[in-house]
Amino acid sequence: MAINDDDAGRCVSADIAAGISPAAALFHSLADENRLRIVARLARGEARVVDLVGELGLAQSTVSKHLACLRDCGLVDYRAEGRQSFYSLTRPELMDLLASAEHLLAATGHAVALCPVHGTRHGTAHGAADARGALRAEPGHDLEHLGRRAGEIEGKALS
């Protein structure tokens, strides 16, 4: 399973990833808000890069980089139709994992998302936005509390 190296903007080699447990590699591949947003969109059905760019408001290069990481991790694949590629989730049970994560966040009072070390990028306003949007995987999941709390943190970070 490849892991995205955010500093270099690419997935790291297998020999580097070999030192990381498969579970850690899986969660690392899902640790980026944009990758979670892509996964959430693909849970609703297949999409082209251009669709993801338009719907998520991301640059084409960003979408392509994250799709490559998710493909390397075996979570996303594509089918070619003419000159177009249609991306989809390879494992729909990934959404069950993300739903379980939401339940865990709710059960812990969102302590993980609000952790000053790991949850909000050391209390920055950008981190609060990450916490607010990361797991909007399916309609109906209650993340309003997380959004309100992230907004409170964002307000404090900007003060």
Image (tube, rainbow, N blue to C red):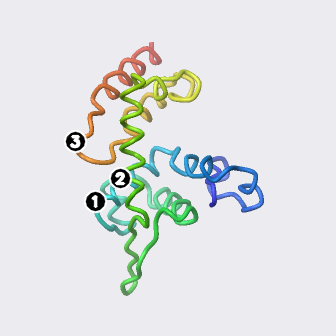
The mark found on residue 40 in the picture is 2
Label 3 or label 1, whichever comes before in sequence order? 1
Residue assigned mark 1: 44
Q: Looking at the picture, does residue 81 appear above or below residue 78?
A: below
Q: Amino acid at mark 1?
A: Arg
Q: Is residue 73 left or right of residue 83?
A: right
Q: Amino acid at mark 3?
A: Gly
Percent of width and height locating residue 50? 36, 66
Which secondary structure lies at badge 3? loop
Residue assigned mark 3: 140
Percent of width and height locating residue 112? 49, 27
Total marks in image: 3
Residues at circles 2 and 1 in contact by the CB criterion of under 8 Å: yes
Label 2 or label 3, whichever comes before in sequence order? 2
Residues at circles 3 and 1 in contact by the CB criterion of under 8 Å: no
Q: Looking at the picture, does residue 6 appear above or below residue 158?
A: below
Quarter placement of the C terminus: top left
